[in-house]
Image (spheres, rainbow, N blue to C red):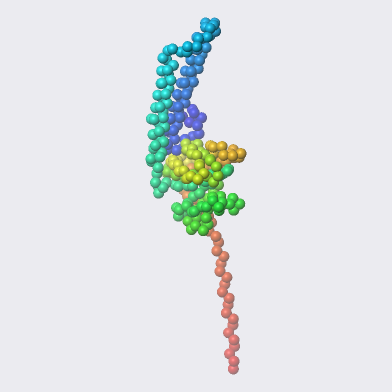
Amino acid sequence: MEKLLGLPINASAHGPELDHMNALVHWLMLVLFVGWSLYFLFVLFLFRAGRHPKAVYEGAKGKLSKGIEVAVAIVEAILLIVYAVPAWARRVADFPPESEATVVRVIAQQFAWNVHYAGADGVFGRSRAELVDAGRLNFIGLDPSDPAAGDDIVVQNQLHLPVGKPVIVKLTSLDVIHSFYLPQMRVKQDVIPGMEIPLWFVPTMTTPAGEQWNIACAQLCGNSHYRMKGIYAIDDQAGYEKWLADNAPKPRAVPPAAPAPEPPPAAPPHG
């Protein structure tokens, strides 16, 4: 189905359902395109000037056109009620508990994706807007005085996730509206300033060797929107844990304590 519709490979659990609905919509559009094209040619022939030199303004009197319009409306209602609404409702109602998922924060900005992992303690450190400082690589304003922030991992334009486990991405923005789009995961969500918007999916395959999957911004967000893209990868569990370990904050080296001064030699006895 992906090749037929020109879609990227599907690598998520909910992707086949969306691709199926997408295919049904395209089939409906194909039928309408062919049908209306044939009807257009038929009308051109039937009402040609040689046969009807004088224009008639009464319009069509038959019931066929109205019946076709009603049939198209019914098919569109079926696609909406039977496929689209239930699929959306399941995504909202079946949100996995965070204890059973990989939870990641993604903070959008012009023109980059900042990715925040909670670290070994599983607790996200506090972040404050006034602490954002790209020069010091504090892209999200992580508060160094918060004990939970010490082991947090913050990277830019790269996202790593484990395969076969629910993923919850909490989306926020530092500036304007963006749109977080992972084509292979079949997820796309607007990112609104002042709001934290969660989305979830389950990756079903790892990123093939030698391939790069892109994080895209699907919302025009400024004059450099074209370069707002990152790379994401789906790893096996061992590879994911290795990536976390490689990117974890390195503990600061503690300088060795200075040796204690030697006591002065004892004075010789008087005698």
Nearer-the-camera pick, 130 or 78: 130
Whether residue 117 is situated above or below residue 188 in the rendered picture: below
Whether residue 53 is situated above or below residue 133 in the rendered picture: above
Residue 32 image point, x, y percent: 47, 21
Nearer-the-camera pick, 259 or 202: 202
Whether residue 104 is situated above or below residue 81 in the rendered picture: below
User: Which quadrant is the C terminus positioned in?
Assistant: bottom right
Q: In the image, what residue occupies the spot 47% across and 41% down?
A: 206
- Residue, far bottom: 271
Nearer-the-camera pick, 234 or 81: 81
- For residue 163, say whether it is visible: no
Residue 241 image point, x, y percent: 47, 50
Q: In the image, what residue occupies the spot 52% across and 52% down?
A: 128
Residue 254 image point, x, y percent: 55, 64
Number of callouts? 0
Q: In the image, what residue occupies the spot 48% across and 31% down?
A: 2
Nearer-the-camera pick, 186 or 75: 75
Among the 4 quarters of the image, the one containing residue 113: top right
Residue 124 image point, x, y percent: 47, 52
- For residue 33, say whether it is visible: yes
Q: In the image, what residue occupies the spot 52% across and 9% down?
A: 55
